[in-house]
Amino acid sequence: MSIIPKEEWSKLHIAKFDDWTLGVGGNQHVLGWLIIFPPRAFEGSMVHLTDKEMLDFKKIGQIAEDLLKECFNPDWFNYCQQGNNVKRIHIHLQPRYLSERVFEGHTFTDEGFIGKGTIRFLNDENLAPKELVFKIVQKLRDALKSKDIKDFKVEILNN
């Protein structure tokens, strides 16, 4: 039901950590699918991150996992480096769930987890509606407000 149009992608951004951006994936194939954008745009792969950027990525990933645990209680996490449609390296953080999760009345089922392969990509009509995706963004923003993060200047985004 929802593929967030490109002109609304900035509304998916949760926060900036220095120059890194943490956002919600526009297509919520699993509840809380996040995307982490490094501070500089480049093509290739994440092995081209500097040592400092790799360390920052690790810290931001830990912050993001903690947010997801607090908000949606996932059972596992997968990371996938992408750059296919958006020609800029970005890292997908895919929370995984052994059982259904209900958020704002919408049931999310991770049918591809444990012994069934990778993420099961949903047809557009089975995706969370656009308004619900923006509620996921807001829930994560609200949870982040209560965190005391020392390693980064954090700017919670309200687009």
Image (cartoon, helix red, strand yellow):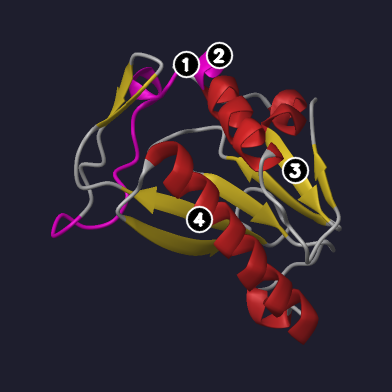
Q: Which residue is mark 2?
A: 131
Which of marks 1 and 4 precedes in the sequence?
4
Residue 6 is situated, as x and y percent measured from the top left of the image, at: 71, 29
Give the extent of the magenta segment. Answer: 114-132
Residue that appears at 71% across and 37% down: 13
Q: Quick one: SS at disc 2?
A: helix
From mark 4 to mark 1, how far is it between C-alphas? 24 Å
| CA distance for labels 3 and 2 | 19 Å
Check disc 3 and give the amino acid type. Ala
Q: Quadrant of residue 155?
A: top right
Residue 94, horizontal then vertical, whole percent: 44, 52
For residue 53, above or below residue 24: below
Label disc, if present, on residue 15 of the rendered structure: 3
Would you say residue 5 is visible in this rendering? yes
Please, is residue 151 above or below residue 92 in the view?
Answer: below
Q: CA distance from mark 2 to mark 4?
A: 23 Å
Tell me the distance, in whole angstroms, between the alpha carbons under discs 4 and 3: 14 Å
Please report contact status of discs 4 and 1: CB closer than 8 Å, yes or no: no
Question: Considering the numbered disc 4 on the image, is that residue within a helix, a strand or a loop?
Answer: helix
Q: Is residue 82 visible?
A: no
Q: Looking at the image, do the residues carrying marks 2 and 1 touch, with CB atoms under 8 Å apart?
A: yes
Between residues 89 and 101, which one lies in front from this camera angle? Answer: 101
Q: CA distance from mark 2 to mark 1?
A: 6 Å
User: Residue visible at 65% across and 62% down?
Assistant: 60
- Identify the residue position indicated by label 1 in the image: 129
The answer to whether mark 2 and mark 4 are in CB contact below 8 A is: no
> Which callout, 4 or 3, points at the residue further toward the start of the chain?
3
Q: Earlier in the sequence, mark 3 or mark 2?
A: 3
Please, what is the three-letter code of the amino acid marked with disc 2? Answer: Glu
Q: Position of residue 158 (x, y in %)?
A: 79, 27
